[in-house]
Image: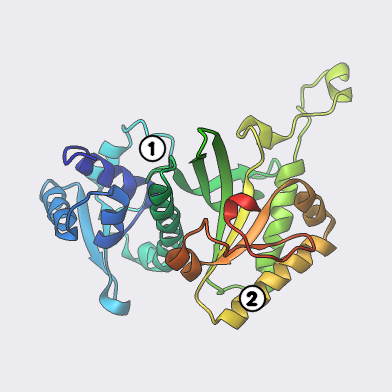
Amino acid sequence: MSPLDAPYTALACLYMHRMATSAQLHALIGIQRAERTTRLLLHDLSKEGLVASVELPAGRTKLWLLTPTGRDLCATFPEVREREYPLVAGDTVHLRRRAAHTLAVLRTHLAFLADGRARGDEYGPLDWEPEVYHRLSDQRADALIADALMRYTANGPSGARRQLRAFVEVDRCTMGSERLASKLMTYGRFLEYAPVPVAAGRRQAMAAPMPVWQRYYPVYPRVLFVLTGASRTVMERRIDDLRAMTGANPLAVRLARQVPLGAAVLEDLEQQGPAAAVWTPVAGEDLEPRGWMDL
């Protein structure tokens, strides 16, 4: 990336990911220079009134966000224009409530980004879309809201390419294990949700309606659970609970038959890379760890 692209990318990343530390933005932009270069860039964008920093009380973490002016500018960028407006600096109450989870989701993205760059795959800072919403009925509140959707293209040694998509759920072990496992039911509902149009004629009503997910994806994305924030024992038990759900609930059972499902620990992704054998299959008898593309 050239230095001229860096400001544009930094702004687009803040629009897409809502908030980030200077170190995270440095990793997102991918400039092959010292992190100080990114801090100077943020200082310049701050002087232009496009970004602002907010310091959180816990650990005195400094986060960077868009200002209203920066938000309005980024809304015109073609890469992110379909996204809703993100948080803006000054909304500190909302920021503090969301920061821990948002940063954990961003850490997960950065693990995939570093691994993709090292492997020579096609995966950039904006190929990770947080908070993807899909309705599950005519009620807006009845919906699947994935922590993130990842679009990843793997380049094989012989020129073969694989276009992969994944829904990603980041679990900081703050909710009950049953609630985590129930997300498999939600993904199962989305797999099967196929409403019949209200104005459908008799012939159309007799035909099997198309599942909604096929309007958005050529193949149903795999589902990846990433755990952090607890002891290894606690996280392994939560993965066991996910596996139990795929053998007990009919929606989860049918999902597991058609969609690759896996779970891993965030710290393992950061240390070994997501392509390493750190993923436990959430369904089936084979518990051998594997890379996320091999689930």
Location of the N terminus (image quadrant) = top left
Q: Position of residue 119 (x, y in %)?
A: 43, 48
Per the image, the residue denoted by label 1 is 80
Closest to the observer: 82 or 264? Answer: 264
* Displayed quadrant of residue 96: bottom left
Mark 2: amino acid:
Glu
User: In percent of the image, x 64 and y 48: which residue is there?
Assistant: 222
Q: Position of residue 33 (x, y in %)?
A: 18, 53
Q: Position of residue 140 (x, y in %)?
A: 62, 45
Q: Could you say whether the residue bearing mark 1 is in a helix, strand or loop?
A: loop
95 left or right of 284 in image: left
Closest to the observer: 99 or 173? Answer: 173
Would residue 89 be seen by someone viewing this image from the given angle?
no
Vertical placement of 209 versus 43: above or below? above
**Mark 2, other Cα within 10 Å: few <14 / some 14–19 / many ≥20:** some
Q: Which mark is residue 236?
A: 2
Would residue 150 be seen by someone viewing this image from the given angle?
yes
55 left or right of 93 in image: left
Compare marks 1 and 2 and give the one earlier in the sequence.
Answer: 1
Q: Could you say whether the residue bearing mark 2 is in a helix, strand or loop?
A: helix
Closest to the observer: 132 or 267? Answer: 267
**Mark 1, other Cα within 10 Å: few <14 / some 14–19 / many ≥20:** some
Q: Cα distance, mark 1 to mark 2?
A: 36 Å
Mark 1: amino acid:
Val
